Amino acid sequence: MSDLFPSSSTARKADSYDANDIEVLEGLEPVRRRPGMYIGGTDEAALHHLVAEVLDNGMDEAVAGYANRIEIKLCDNNTVTISDNGRGIPVDNHPKFPGKSALEVILTTLHSGGKFSDKVYQTSGGLHGVGISVVNALAEELIVEVARDKQLFVQTYCRGVPQGKLKKMGAVNRRGTTVTFRPDPEIFGTKLRFKPATLFRMARSKAYLFRGVEIRWSCDPALIKTDDLTPVEATLHFPGGLADYLTSALDGRETITPQLFSGMAELPDGKGKVEWAVAWPMDGQGFCHSYCNTIPTPQGGTHESGLRSALLRGLRGHGELLGNRRAAAITGDEAFGDCCALLSLFIREPQFQGQTKDKLATIEALRLVDQVVKDHFDHWLSGDPVNSKALLDYLVLKAEERVRLTQAKDMARKTATRKLRLPGKLSDCSQTAAENTELFLVEGDSAGGSAKQARNRDTQAILPLRGKILNVASASTDKLRANQEISDLGLALGCGMGSTFDTSKLRYERIIIMTDADVDGAHIASLLMTFFYREMPGLINAGKLYLAQPPLYRLTQGSKTAYARDDAHKEELLDAVFASRGKVEISRFKGLGEMMPAQLRETTMDPRTRSLLRVVITEADSPDKATDIKETEMLVEKLMGRKAESRFQFIQENAKFVQEVDI
């Protein structure tokens, strides 16, 4: 019984918990005990974050207007030296810590510094007062030199502990702060070392972010590998700011608009400033790099949300101004998701998520950035109407493609467990495999009735279409989605449309457009070819789309009968087949529906006697191949697109070639 229930005195001894168990970590000891809380870990990213903390102090001096030069040097013993020509860290005694200089307080005390108010810095990156002290705590050795009031002061630290008092070294004719440190292998291990390429990119991005600073980079040549393009020495200064940065990042990639949307502006009520540069690449591979007070915010935040809102509202508003209702379909995914953007915000007392400042959380930043950038974006769009319209059209197409893809996925989910659904007007063939099967797209129910009787039921399917289908080159996504004829056609083919098209899912080997041999029939055929060109170009490229060649005339002389495709063919037959044999009876078919099933089978549908035209997209096996494809696209857009003026111009230019023909 006693083993199961120990005495109360024994229990108290085993569970003792009193003041002696309370541990108080002083100075920089918490940093060394839990470095991940301050720099995110002890990996390569955290190692380089140490340099960023020191570099940001120099950038704060530059942004405040007290420095214009920063130097970074990487040595072969894994030591980094960062210096600026700013005011220099104060070295006089701190009033709250007798016998300690302000420099020593800053380097050995968490949450100490001159950036908690706006008296010293209007904007700054280091706001928690832990940056340089954390670096000091995690450094095997740190040497700080301060040139201030024409005097040089030096102090050395080891793992955050001063190795002596601040020393006054004598007179100098310069000013600023120099920090040299080597990371502690007890924290980061012996194999982890600074990478020249990473530090150079960091230095270059800082130079882009503040056009008033010059950053001088140098590195021990022994640290640069043969395949590394990092320079040994470089002077980084970019008067163009983020516009220069984005131009370099794009590296010659083709963009929708030739000019970047870039600029810099003061925030209302003197709350800071914002700079931006945006481009929309043709390949759709976008990115966004944002910064607050020169601090990278890889997880974005409220300032990125403000830029996204400004671009979206500007594009929709410009579309409304142009009367383009389809612009309302644009979302932030198109306006911002596929663009290449750089954003730099300078504000007082920003709020970040976490000590590593990966995401900006200042709520007001969203409104400020949105308001300022939106005004400039409106002027940029209206100032270049041609390229602005091109950008708008491009993003509208992206939005419509997104909607189409979403609907296709929804349809796939809905029909995944259901029996295959086919349109009611489709008269399908009995063969289930696609090999040797054909789908005839015919004009109207009347023609459909004749075609059904004329077909081979085993391999030939018939889908009647009601008159002229929708012109997909000039229709919105909503109209395309709501059109019953196109919906029926998509269901019958089974291979998807747009980005979801898959040739392997096509239910037939050949698709044959079979329309009347007149002007209206040619128009319907052109609308269908436009549909396939825009929504299923892979079907054309695979050689699966054909045009039937039904006759326009029937020529009879006694027991001899022939069929003519058009007037020229009729004259050819009269001269070659029916010459000098008496009167020839000529009848003109008003449509496929008036042909007897036997006639339609013999002339148009029977593979043994018919003629088909394969539809191809003109491409040349030459350096001009891309040009041919582009010209085809331009021709389709001119004749079938949204711009009626383009068609009118084409008619004016080619009307002189039209000849009247008696029919």
Image (cartoon, rainbow, N blue to C red):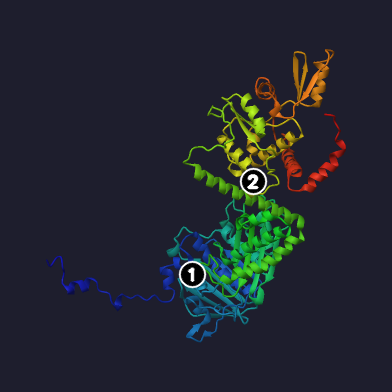
Quadrant housing residue 25: bottom left
Residue 217 drawn above or below residue 130: above
For marks 2 and 1, give the one nearer the viewer. Answer: 2
At mark 1, the secondary structure is strand
In the displayed image of the protein, which residue is found farthest to the left?
Answer: 1
Residue 17 visible from this viewpoint: yes
Quadrant housing residue 483: top right
Quadrant the N terminus occupies: bottom left
Which amino acid type corresponds to the residue marked 1 in the rendered image?
Answer: Glu
Locate residue 595, reporting x and y percent.
70, 25
Locate residue 563, reporting x and y percent.
75, 21
Residue 473 drawn above or below residue 103: above
Residue 65 visible from this viewpoint: no
Report the side of 103 relative to 602 (left or right).
left
Q: Give me the residue at 51% from left, 80% from top.
A: 166
Residue 141, numbered circle? 1
Report the side of 201 relative to 21 (left or right).
right
Q: Nearer the viewer, residue 304 or 345?
A: 304
Labelled pair 2, 1 in contact (Cβ < 8 Å): no
Which amino acid type corresponds to the residue marked 2 in the rendered image?
Answer: Leu
Quadrant the C terminus occupies: top right
Residue 571 drawn above or below residue 224: above
Quadrant housing residue 80: bottom right
Cα distance between the residues tagged 2 and 1: 69 Å
At mark 2, the secondary structure is helix
Locate residue 115, reporting x and y percent.
56, 77
Q: Give me the residue at 71% from left, 66% from top.
A: 376
Locate residue 489, reporting x and y percent.
61, 38
Q: Which residue is mark 2?
A: 480
Q: Nearer the viewer, residue 407 or 623?
A: 407
